[in-house]
Image (cartoon, rainbow, N blue to C red):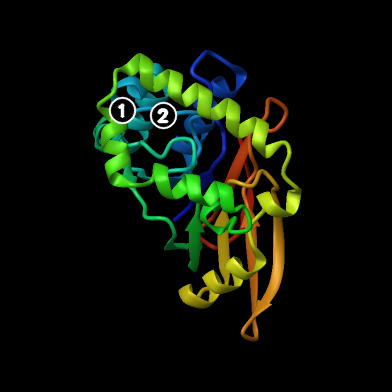
Amino acid sequence: MTAWLVSDLHLPPKPSPLREGFLRWLAAAAQDARQVILLGDIFEAWVGDDLGIETYAEEVAALRRLSAAGIDLRFMVGNRDFLLGNGFCAATGARPLPDPCIVTLGGRPTLLSHGDQWCRDDAGYQRYRRVVHHAGVQRLFLRLPRALRQRIADRLRRQSRAVTATKPVTITDVSPQAIIEAFGHAGVDRIIHGHTHRPAVHHLTVDGRACERQVLPDWTPARMEGLRIAADGQRTPAPA
């Protein structure tokens, strides 16, 4: 079946060309795809289903229309929207995917991930990731008042942007060794992920096997697209 994949839109809470583009992208997917996979960081920040579903009401409704039409809607959390939860699933009809996981796309088993767990050379980020993905930390955070959650998220985003700007590119990209290990553990010859904002197709050899790693594009007003994989395996851009 034809699948559409997308990641790293970083949709802001206020109206923007990116949000308009995502609605167009979903409408186009509804006419062509049998499966839609969101690979993380669709939203710039998701500080709980109670607030996120209100803030992104149009996007939630569009996703619900997809699933109601019988399209297999899946999502994986990213490093910005890792608090997507059961409320989001109920509102949209989307089903969560573990990170990473193997999904057959175009007849080819493919390892999918948001990708941030493979940025192992960025020790500071990995410490932060372990904290915010801890179930106890998430439960405590979600008990806070909505306004306080939003302020904390805003501050963390500002700090993240400032720190990331000072880091070498090699640190914020995926670790080559992590990718080799991921291929070896999964036993597949293709990985698709996002997170790094460095769209490309990389070819490598792992244990004598020809493998490839495809990085999905992040969205900007000048580039709003995902990836379309047809039932026969053909890959083409899926623009908004």
Q: Is residue 56 above or below residue 88?
A: above
Q: Nearer the viewer, residue 110 or 150?
A: 150
Of all residues, the one furthest to the bottom in this rendering is: 208
Residue holding disc 1: 49
Amino acid bearing label 1: Asp
Q: Is residue 216 visible?
A: yes
Judged from the image, the secondary structure of the residue bearing numbered disc 1 is helix
| Residue at (49, 44) in percent of width and height | 128
Which quadrant would the N terminus be assigned to in this image?
bottom left
Residue at coordinates 37% horizontally, 23% vertically from top-left? Answer: 52
Residue 211 located left or right of residue 125: right
Badge 2: how crowded within 10 Å, few (<14), some, or many (20+)? Answer: many
Looking at the image, residue 60 lies above or below residue 208: above
The relative height of residue 98 versus residue 206 in the rendered view (above or below) is above
Where in the figure is residue 8, as x and y percent of width and height?
57, 38
Answer yes or no: do the residues labelled 1 and 2 have beta carbons within 8 Å? yes
Q: CA distance from mark 1 to mark 2?
A: 7 Å
> Which dot marks residue 46?
2
Viewer-side residue, 193 vs 46? 46
Q: Can residue 187 be spotted in the picture? A: no
Work out whether 159 lies above or below 191: above
Determine the secondary structure under disc 2: loop
Total number of numbered discs in the rendering: 2
